[in-house]
Image (cartoon, rainbow, N blue to C red):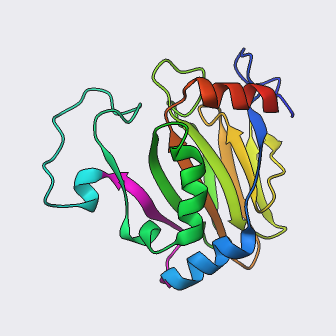
Amino acid sequence: MISSSNSVDSKWSDRIQLPFHFDVEKMKADIAQLQLGEFIYYDALPLRSPAHMVDTSLPFPPPAEDFADGSWTPWLDTPALLKSPYLTEVVDTFKSNTKVTLVRLLRLAPGAIVKEHTDPTLALEEQKSVVRLTVPIITNDQVEFYLNNELVPMKVGECWYLRLSDPHRINNTGTTERINLTIDMIPNEWLKSMIAKAS
């Protein structure tokens, strides 16, 4: 895997393709039955969220100074995920090995651009970190994801660890939307070992 010369000094690459490949047609079928509505520019559909946002009968979690590691609240699958058998299977691949927190379908409209930015906690190098894995589901040849000014060649069905505390940006200059599944999790020895072997 490529390691950018612009990235921070680390034993980890800024991008690592993991040894998973998920069934694209099954993921698309789950998305189709969700009947996602129209949107402008960017849309995020939660598939796993803080428990009190899924079940409103649950109390709000106590105030927390640091939300980064996801320990401030229990997490639950949303109704959208419960209606999506294959997406549930994908998420369960990781839930059986580590704590999975936020899971979303991220949609980027045709012609939309996400400007360069950083997500400070989304890296293995951070003390209180969350690892975000990305699985492209729907894309086109004009979708470009740049990390540290280098294109990440993600293909549908693949699973990638990206160090998102580094600068990254996205261009969708195509005529169709892009949909990625993102899975946030607490890094443990299982996850770190898998990423290390893949790199």
Q: Residue at x 69, y 25 (%)?
A: 193
Q: How many marks?
A: 0
Q: State the image coordinates of residue 155 (x, y, percent, origin top left).
A: 81, 58
- The question of residue 30 being in magenta is answered with no
Name the residue at the front extreme: 96
Left/right of residue 86 with respect to residue 95 in the rendered view:
right
Above or below, 160 relative to 82: above
Above or below, 59 relative to 6: below
Above or below, 197 relative to 39: above
Identify the image quadrant of the N terminus.
top right
* Res 162 seen here: yes
Q: Residue at x 58, y 42 (%)?
A: 132
* Res 199 seen here: no
Residue range in magenta is 35-50
- The question of residue 42 being in magenta is answered with yes
Give the quarter of the image for residue 29. bottom right
Q: Residue at x 60, y 50 (%)?
A: 93
Q: State the image coordinates of residue 121 (x, y, percent, origin top left).
A: 50, 30
Q: State the image coordinates of residue 153 (x, y, percent, origin top left).
A: 84, 51
Q: State the image coordinates of residue 198 (x, y, percent, origin top left).
A: 80, 33
Left/right of residue 198 with respect to residue 118 in the rendered view:
right
